Image (cartoon, rainbow, N blue to C red):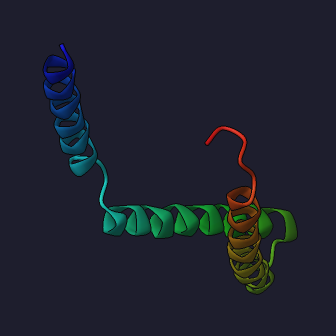
Amino acid sequence: MIADQLIISNKKEKASFKKDKNSESPKRSIVKSISWRAIGTLDTIIISWVITGTLTLAFSIGVVELVTKMALYFFHERIWNTISWGK
């Protein structure tokens, strides 16, 4: 009975490892993060351009938004790492 449980448990661990192994790689996550941030910044630049009518001002707003949102995200993640809820 105990041997059966160990065998079943071992098979489940191997199955979950394969599932984890096939999940998204860190490099893919980084590229996706960069591409998403680029899309978000482009959206901000376009909206700023439409509202202000000035492309230079729109790019300035976009650059500020890019830097501040990356910093905010970093601190957001660090704070969430200290919260044990849901782990």
In which quadrant will I find the N terminus? top left
Left or right of 74, for residue 21: left
Quadrant containing the C terminus in the rendered view: top right
Viewer-nearest residue: 16 or 77: 16
Residue farthest toward the top in the current orientation of the protein: 1
In this rendering, the answer to whether 84 lies above or below 2 is: below
Q: Position of residue 14 (x, y in %)?
A: 17, 39
Q: Residue at x 36, y 65 (%)?
A: 26
* Front-most of residues 85 and 65: 85
For residue 15, above or below residue 84: above
Nearer the observer, 43 or 35: 35
Instruction: Tell me which residue sits at (15%, 30%) in the image.
Output: 11
Residue 6 point in image, percent of width and height: 19, 28
- Residue 87 left/right relative to 9: right
Q: Residue at x 75, y 52 (%)?
A: 83
From this view, report whether residue 82 is shown above or below residue 64.
above
Q: Residue at x 71, y 48 (%)?
A: 84
